[in-house]
Image: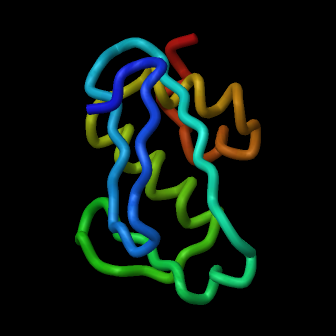
Amino acid sequence: RVQAGEVISLPEDAIHNIENPTESVSASLHIYGGDFGALMDERSLWSTEEHKEKVFSFPALLEESVKAMQHDGNTTGLKELAKAIPAAKPLVGDALACD
C-alpha cells in the first residue's frame, strides 16, 4: 500500500498492478527514466480476464483498465476516467447511464 504523500521506487523490470480498494478517487504520478518511447516494443500488458500477456499500447492499457474497473464494480472510477479521458466514454458505456 502506498498512502497519500508517500513515494516508492520500483526496479526497472518490475511487473506491477495498481488498484484502489476504496470508493474515494485516487491519482498517481509515474516518472520513468530514460527514453520511454524507445521501450514501447519491450513493454507488455496483462489481460484482465485471461491473465495473458498482450502487446502494450496506450489504447490497450485503457481498455484493460476499464475492464478491471467494470469487473470490480468501480463506477466511481469509470466515471472519473471518462471525465479525465473523454475518448474512454465509449469503453465505459453503461456505467455512465446512471448520471
35 displayed left or right of 33: right
Quarter holding residue 74 = top left
Total tally of numbered discs in the picture: 0
Q: Is residue 87 above or below residue 48?
A: above
56 or 38: nearer the eye? 38
Q: Residue at x 47, y 27 (%)?
A: 77
Residue that protrudes farthest toward the bottom in the picture:
41
Picture colour scheme? rainbow
In the image, residue 96 lies at what x, y percent? 56, 24
Q: Is residue 81 above or below residue 68?
A: above
In the image, residue 53 lies at what x, y percent? 35, 80
In the image, residue 21 lies at what x, y percent? 26, 26
For the C terminus, the quadrant is top right
Q: Is residue 40 above or below residue 72?
A: below
95 or 59: nearer the eye? 59
72 displayed left or right of 11: left
In the image, residue 58 lies at what x, y percent? 64, 63
Q: Residue at x 61, y 88 (%)?
A: 41
Q: Residue at x 27, y 35 (%)?
A: 72
For the N terminus, the quadrant is top left
Q: Residue at x 31, y 60 (%)?
A: 48
Quarter holding residue 60 = bottom right
4 displayed left or right of 53: right
Q: Is residue 60 above or below residue 82?
A: below
